[in-house]
Image: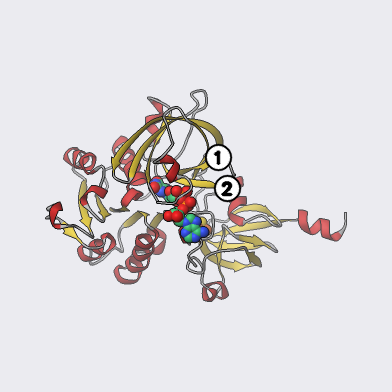
Amino acid sequence: MTSAEAATTAAFQITVQPSGRAFSANAGEAILAAAIRSGVGLPYGCKDGACGSCKCKKLSGTVQHGAHQSKALTADEEAAGLVLTCCAQPLSDVVLESRQVTDESAYPVKKMPVRVASLEKKSDDVMQVRLQLPAADTFRYHAGQYIEFILRDGTRRAYSMANAPHTQAEAPGVELHIRHMAGGKFTDHVFGAMKEKEILRVEGPFGSFFLREDSDKPIVLLASGTGFAPIKALIEHLQFKGISRPTVLYWGGRRPGDLYLADWVQARVAELPWLRYVPVISNALPEDGWTGRTGFVHQAVLDDFADLSGHQVYACGAPIVVESARDAYSAQRGLPPEEFFADAFTSEADKHGG
Ligand SMILES: Cc1cc2nc3c(=O)[nH]c(=O)nc-3n(C[C@H](O)[C@H](O)[C@H](O)COP(=O)(O)OP(=O)(O)OC[C@H]3O[C@@H](n4cnc5c(N)ncnc54)[C@H](O)[C@@H]3O)c2cc1C
Ligand code: FES
């Protein structure tokens, strides 16, 4: 074997502190891809250098970063030794620090064909899509995780599952809430030509956005738009497991119609004494007759909580909401960064926006 061949086939040891979990990554392989392959649950979201969820501190070793957004990892952060595991390839053995690492989180990632079982418009721009999964093959995931559609050209689009996994026992299938992004490759299809019975290919489950059941801290759920999808799965899961940690859901939209399952939430609030609901509207028009809270949804949490140091926050949806919440809750309300769990719904627009 030449030294060049040896370099391309070399495997490096990646160790995650303080848990001490270790796995091997091949030269040229992103650290996160190797972790998923090895069943080690590092935190992540977009897998594509856009959201910053996989950012963690490098304690030793050398990596080389592939393309990523500067807002996900600034040059200063990189110089200070922070890495994005989704696009960092090891050039040596590496030791990382990540407090959110979980051992038990990894269910097998599967590719499978799915059939569109139903399409139901919930608002002007939100489609509830139910997918039927292959019956022979149990699909295991954590409430809050997502699947990816593999499109014909090989590109992928991620959608969070809106139903908790226990619902698989009745009928193998997943529910998605898909918002139309005009000009979007996949959602133009969902709102245009997609029909019931269409067959698509998906892969999953992915993601580190799921309930940390080893905690008894009170919970703030923060959703913007279809960011409600994985939050709905979390509420279903809490109810199914009989977990009664005090939980408050802040759901934000521009207009009241954007809170497309508000009735579902009100019905849960009526039966679950530990759940409160605060809908927040940013751009109500007079004809909406909106008398509830107004403004930005992440700000409503800041207005209501002087101190978040004893809470866990689960946030999903528009990247700007997730980023604003992550920054402000830690800096201004004492939320420990490792108690903030999020999926930012990044799209092509975010990846090409600089
Ligand atoms: C972990 C995760 C979970 C998600 N879960 C959900 C979910 O539950 N529900 C949901 O609705 N969404 C979710 N998303 C977002 C979703 O994956 C898609 O990004 C979104 O639906 C848009 O897909 P699309 O193919 O229609 O649009 P894209 O083709 O990605 O385009 C998006 C927008 O960007 C514009 N655009 C395309 N290319 C460029 C370019 N080069 N430069 C500038 N602008 C461009 C398009 O015109 C369009 O308006 C999630 C994302 C992530 C990362
Ligand atoms: S930037 Fe790495 S997962 Fe999003």
- The residue sitting at 20% across, 40% down in the picture is 263
Q: Are marks 2 and 1 in contact (CB under 8 Å)?
A: yes
Q: Amino acid at mark 1?
A: Val
For label 2, the residue is 36
Query: Could you tell me which quadrant the N terminus lies in?
Result: bottom right
Is 337 located above or below residue 221 in the figure? Answer: below
Q: Is residue 171 left or right of residue 252?
A: right
Image coloring type = secondary structure
Residue 39: numbered disc: none
Q: Is residue 347 left or right of residue 108?
A: left
* Residue 306 image offset from top left, x and y in percent: 23, 67
Residue 81 makes an appearance in the image = yes
Q: Residue furthest top?
A: 136
Q: Amino acid at mark 2?
A: Ile
* Residue 268 image offset from top left, x and y in percent: 22, 39
Is 208 located above or below residue 72 in the figure? Answer: above
Residue 51 makes an appearance in the image = no
Q: Residues within 10 Å of mark 2 (few under 14, many from 20)?
A: some
* Residue 295 image offset from top left, x and y in percent: 22, 63
Secondary structure under tag 1 reads: loop
Q: Residues within 10 Å of mark 1 (few under 14, many from 20)?
A: some
Residue 109: numbered disc: 1
Q: Is residue 189 left or right of residue 228?
A: right
Secondary structure under tag 2 reads: helix
289 and 135: which is toward the camera: 289
